[in-house]
Amino acid sequence: MSLQRCLLAGIGLICILGNLALAAPVTRRSVIVQAVERAKPAVVNIHSERNSTGAAPGDAQETVPTQQRSNGMGTGIIIDPRGYIITNHHVVEDVSLLRVRLSDGTPYVARVIDREKEFDLALLKIDAPRPLPTISVGTSSDLMVGETVIAIGNAYGYEHTVTVGVISALHRDVTLNKDISYKSLIQTDASINPGNSGGPLLNIDGELIGVNVAIRAGAQGIGFAIPADQMVQVVTDMLARRRKTDISPGLGYRNRVDVRQSPPWSMEVERVEAQGPAERAGIQRGDVIVRLGDVDIYNSLDFERALLHVRPGDQLPIKVRRPDGEKVLELVLQPSMNSGSPNDLAWRRLGVRLMPASADAMSRGGSTLRGGLLVTEVNPDGPGARAGIQRGDILVGLHQWETISLDNVSYVLRHQELATFYPLKVFLLRGGQVHKGWVQAD
């Protein structure tokens, strides 16, 4: 080889190596790295303390075996900048204290807002002084077996552990034991360990496609996640239950998913109540709601988030899309059916009518209770009747509160965390003795 050819070859090699060196920083920031960077700020680590003690109000005492306090761990996903977080029901079950740590290390005490044991999902709330980053919710309707996925979680207490794998199968029905079974889960070989429960399963765009839920004991490379579309529906129902205690927008809705669009979600008005807020605002059946207040609406979860902390009488701009274009209307929220007098509320939610019990009625049988509410009427088809409440009973406690006045009952039934109390403990004075039962409020 001539000297000239050697020089040319050397120069060419230097150019190639130089180009590789320049390209290296770009290729290292792969789509997986970018997906993790987008999603990680919305992932929180959960640490819990469990114990079991309990006592009933008034004269009625409930004996509960005391257990040693134990610590647990899990993961959560921020879905609203005001501090609403989703995780698994089993992460928060029988928990006495919940601590949440954000990705920047900031700790908070969390409270359970609602839970659905059947779907193994729970909604938490932390009170942060600033808006928090939220997850981008994708759809599980177009997942492909073999598709790359990413899991983030508090694996064995190692916070924000990232693992990568593929979707191994779809629509798996899984039974873990006699008490826990799941329907239509996503199966993945991304490593999911104890502590990952409640964390996100992401696609390579950093979108939430599932909530990690379970591992098969003794198996390697087999983990499961609740599909994102199922999570959206369940958490929508949780938020709607809270909203319905105060306000009504006067419309019904349904989600639509079209994977040809970006984003694939949209929310369509399915029903408009006659003379309700939506009808008065000019909203029509078939409208697609794209914004409510300052929240962009892609699905029903966004819609219910937009109604959090809204009060009756508040006016919200609402943008709808129709075939002829978009329109901005004004929606004025009205009180829901749960508003009204405390006795009306007790009739609607419990199926009983109440009045303050006389001192004579309270003293019969030697009771030393401070007061109670006489049951004057029971709806035979209502929750109270199903719970065994009878006309003439005296309601002396509901959940953990005394019921001396109707305002006490109203407080419990309007409590923002009512769903976490279910079924409600009910304490009745009957024949001079306090009896305990449970009632499922409508």
Image (tube, grey):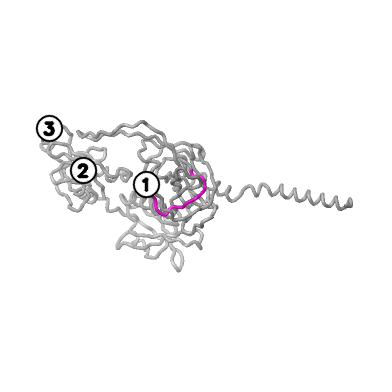
The spot of residue 368 in percent (x, y) is 16, 32
Measured in 3D between alpha carbons, the distance from the residue under mark 3 to the one under mark 1, in whole angstroms, is 46 Å
Q: Amino acid at mark 3?
A: Gly
For numbered disc 3, what is the local secondary structure? Answer: helix
Which residue is identified by label 3?
366
Mark 3 or 2 closer to N-term? Answer: 3
Indicate which label's residue lies in the foreground, 3 or 2: 3
Q: Which residues are magenta?
A: 178-192
Which numbered circle lies on residue 180?
1
Q: Residues within 10 Å of mark 3 (few under 14, many from 20)?
A: few
The spot of residue 109 in percent (x, y) is 41, 37
Indicate which label's residue lies in the foreground, 3 or 1: 1
For numbered disc 2, what is the local secondary structure? Answer: helix
In the image, 312 versus 39, the foreground residue is 39
Is residue 294 in view from this perspective? Answer: no
For numbered disc 1, what is the local secondary structure? Answer: loop
Quarter assignment of residue 320: bottom left
